[in-house]
Image (cartoon, rainbow, N blue to C red):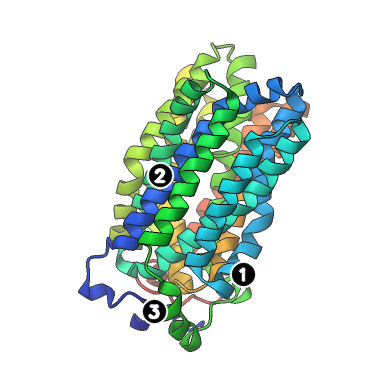
Amino acid sequence: MLRNEETAATAPTGDPGQKPWLGREIQVLSAINFANAVGFGIQAPTLPSFGLELGIGSTMIGGIVAAFSLGRMLSNIPSGKFVERFGERSILIGGLVFLTITSVLAGLSMTGWQLLLFRGIGGIGSACYTVAAMALLLRVTPASHRGRAVGIYMGAFYLGATSGPVLGALLSGFSPRVAFFAYAAGVGTSAIIATLALPRLDKSGKKVAAQTAPMRVKDALRSASYRAALAANFATGWGVYGVRVSVLPLFLITVLQENPAWVGIGLAFGAAVQVAFTPIAGFFTDRLGRKIPLALSQLSICTGFLLVLFLPALWSFLACFGFFAAGASLSATSANALAGDVTGGRGGTVMAVTQFASDTGMVAGPVLAGLLAQFLSYNAAFAVSASVAAYGLLSALLIRPNNNKNKEAEPEPT
């Protein structure tokens, strides 16, 4: 068995049992995550109009949208190594500063290729920030409350992501460039807040690192629990953040022949469910252990695809958005808490791989499901997507019962 990777000494701000679990770090990280999500959401409605202003076509606009996610995906693992080398706080602040600079440059773009470049490299800053923030969150939170901490953190993100597009639509009336400057202002402010409000944990963290080296990825992969977290993240990225916003809207328009406005209604409904349910999902993750919420997350996503596969109708289309939202909330809290348990909160690269799994699913899902829908059928696309979630469900069910409670895990062998 792998050794327990965290002891009481790993909480650099003190003994978790002697202070409230919702410490300053979690509050600051959640506030920063909210501001970052608002800024990112502001850009979403303005990208097409900005592309038209620059005189580029729909293919290039699609590439600009995908460039940010691709930049994140390629930068996740290097970001984890940077976290282990320089500490979470330094990489978090550096990522936010990098995002600020690239957002300003994107807003100043004069050609489509410039916008594509700055959006793509902006993903590097996003990866650094995301990996460092989650690693820090899991490190400073006691295992018994990691689900709730992740629930608050991700709930703040979903709330910001819901509010951002509304503000972006208002700002687009002035100029699409304003959205990028607004994002830069928000992220830059977040960097200042992080610098002033986050304790300098890196110095005390050096003593911990000397006693317990960060877990290696190859060691984490020996754990069925960690492999289940990866499978769940990949399936969630594939279905919820990929197919839901690409293939499903086309299915509504071309097969169900419904008004495209229902796509926005479905997305708004799903967003509301995520905002409301994510903190609750975090509570369930701590009370029930990691295994049950993780399994339910994949079952929920699989059910959503099966509904539109076997009962194609407007009501099932809307219902699947609710199932996807509930699944995403349960997956975000349980998978991240489980990965934190396996690493003992010490493993930037290991945590980066979990994010990489999600981003890979987010990129692969729309492409592969889109090809299936185009050359075979939408039923084939939904069946394969349901199978991906079913594999995540099976992986969750294979977690040994004694290793899914809210405690530091001793990963079971293969």
Compare residues 171 and 408 and report the one nearer the observer: 171
Disc 1 target residue: 81
Question: Are circles 3 and 2 on residues that touch, CB within 8 Å?
Answer: no
Which element type, helix, strand or loop, lies under badge 3? helix
Left or right: 291 with respect to 110?
A: left
Residue 241 seen in this snapshot: yes
Q: Nearer the viewer, mark 3 or mark 2?
A: 2
Q: If the image is split into quadrants, where does the C terminus sit? A: bottom right
Q: Say which residue label 3 marks.
A: 10
Q: Amino acid at mark 2?
A: Phe
Q: Position of residue 395 (x, y in %)?
A: 53, 58
Query: Which labelled disc corresponds to residue 204?
Result: none
Residue on which the image places disc 2: 34
- Lower sequence index among marks 2 and 1: 2
- Label 3 to label 2: alpha-carbon separation: 27 Å
Q: Nearer the viewer, residue 104 or 383?
A: 104
Residue at the spot 36% in from the left edge and 45% down from the top edge: 278
Q: Amino acid at mark 1?
A: Lys
Give the vertical position of 253 relative to 71 (above or below): above
Secondary element under disc 2, as helix, strand or loop, is helix
Residue at 78% x, 35% y is: 113
Query: Residue 39: image x %, image y %?
Result: 49, 38
Q: Which residue does the image show at 52% across and 55% down from the upper left?
A: 130
